[in-house]
Amino acid sequence: MAFNPFTAEHEAFRRTVRQWVEKELTPHALAWDEAGIFPAEVFRKAGEMGLLGIRHSLEAGGAGLDYWYVVVLTEELVRSENAGVNMALLVQAEMATPIIDAIGTPEQKELFLEPAIRGEKIAALGISEPNAGSDVANIRTTARRDGDDYVINGSKMWITNGTRADFITLAVRTGEAGYGGISLVTFPTDVKGFSVAKKLEKVGNLSSDTAILYFEDCRIPRRFLLGEENAGFYQIMTNFQGERLVGALMANAGMERMVEQAMRYGREREAFGRPIGTFQVWRHKFVEHMTGIEAGRHLCYHATALFDDWLHGRGDTPPVREISMAKLYSGDLAQQVAYDCMQFFGGMGYVTETPIARAWRDVRLITIGGGTSEVMKEIIGKLSGL
């Protein structure tokens, strides 16, 4: 690969993460899926290793590193062979907490961000609702002022880490209908009136707990407001970029992992007197996919370079168009790669103890979560003047 953005320090970090993932996570992948949850201790161990605050500020207990370290973490987590664990850790590190680091008050950082970075508290991001998934401007959960408090009523759906989160970075309606009346708050889940209505049974990502949450006259102090009141929509849209880029990077790394496993299997498994990987139909198929994966990697790395520049003040706006392209391309391609690799494994590909079967099931989320492929196309079209 001609373009290599990684330094010796990045590669040393990669080796450390890989060793931890393969020793502490991968051996439990199937058991944790079957249990529908993984131990909360994983968050603490990830925190001890500094994996939950890679690009967070030093003042909050983070490492203050560039976004390429996040790329390394995302690519190496794929080796866990458990997308639910990966999702839960990345929600904590890259979706629920960066906005607190960016605009939170010292009190909010002390109460929520710092223990989340250490893995002592579990974080969730509460945006989606039963009637508002990608359509964030339509959220209905309200936060009404009452003296020095907000009183919150409503519900959230599809919330990762939702059954055991200690706090939620929560989107609420504080003003008029539409995108102009949305705010973000840090919401501690030990508040009276909060409840986990249901743990959702999903097709994939089985070990991550995904929940429907209810808020009934939940009272929190107004000082838990993140940033300015009624400015939350823009904060959410900015936060989405990191979420979508992580999804694209994970899809691309996952595809590469699936093809590697399939090619290894193809050298070992024989049919009609020769290794199945030597049949032209499969050699050509894998050549096509390796070409697509390489293209996806360059899309992801280009978007990452622009995003890292923006995070460090070297750009006026986040690279929304490029990130959307990376997620669209890698997410859609991953569906076909997973299908073909599963087909290549034959009967073994249909058995859940085989990693490819779980990957085929789990990768389906990439084109849905964080904004569907159809939404990505609308964003790209709009930003391209179409």
Image (cartoon, rainbow, N blue to C red):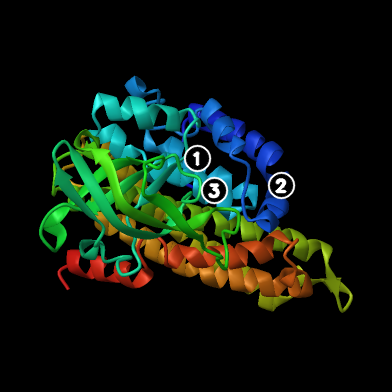
Can you see residue 168? yes
The CA distance from mark 3 to mark 2 is 13 Å
- Mark 1 lies on a secondary structure that is helix
Instruction: Please report whichever mark, 1 or 3, sits nearer to the chain's N-terminal start.
Output: 1
Q: Work out which residue is located at the far top of the displayed protein and give it.
A: 59
Q: Residues within 10 Å of mark 3 (few under 14, many from 20)?
A: many
Per the image, the residue denoted by label 2 is: 28
Nearer the observer, 40 or 240: 40
Q: Is residue 124 left or right of residue 233?
A: right
The residue drawn where x is 57% and y is 45% is 77
Q: Amino acid at mark 3?
A: Asn
Q: Disc 3 designates what residue?
A: 86
> Which residue is painted at 68% across and 75% down in the image?
343
The secondary structure type at the circle numbered 2 is helix
Type of amino acid under label 1: Val
**For the image shown, how many numbered marks are present on the structure?**
3
Kind of residue indicated by mark 2: His
**Residue mark closest to the camera, 2 vs 1:** 2
Which corner quadrant of the image does residue 16 belong to?
A: top right
- Position in image of residue 200 (x %, y %): 52, 63
Residue at 24% in and 66% down: 379
The part of the image, by quadrant, that contains residue 275 is bottom right
152 over 48 or under it: above or below: below
Q: Is residue 319 visible?
A: no
What distance separates the C-alpha of mark 2 from that of mark 1? 22 Å
**In what quadrant of the picture does the C terminus appear?**
bottom left
Q: Secondary structure at mark 3?
A: helix
Q: Which residue is mark 1?
A: 72
- Residues at marks 1 and 3 touching, judged by CB atoms closer than 8 Å: no
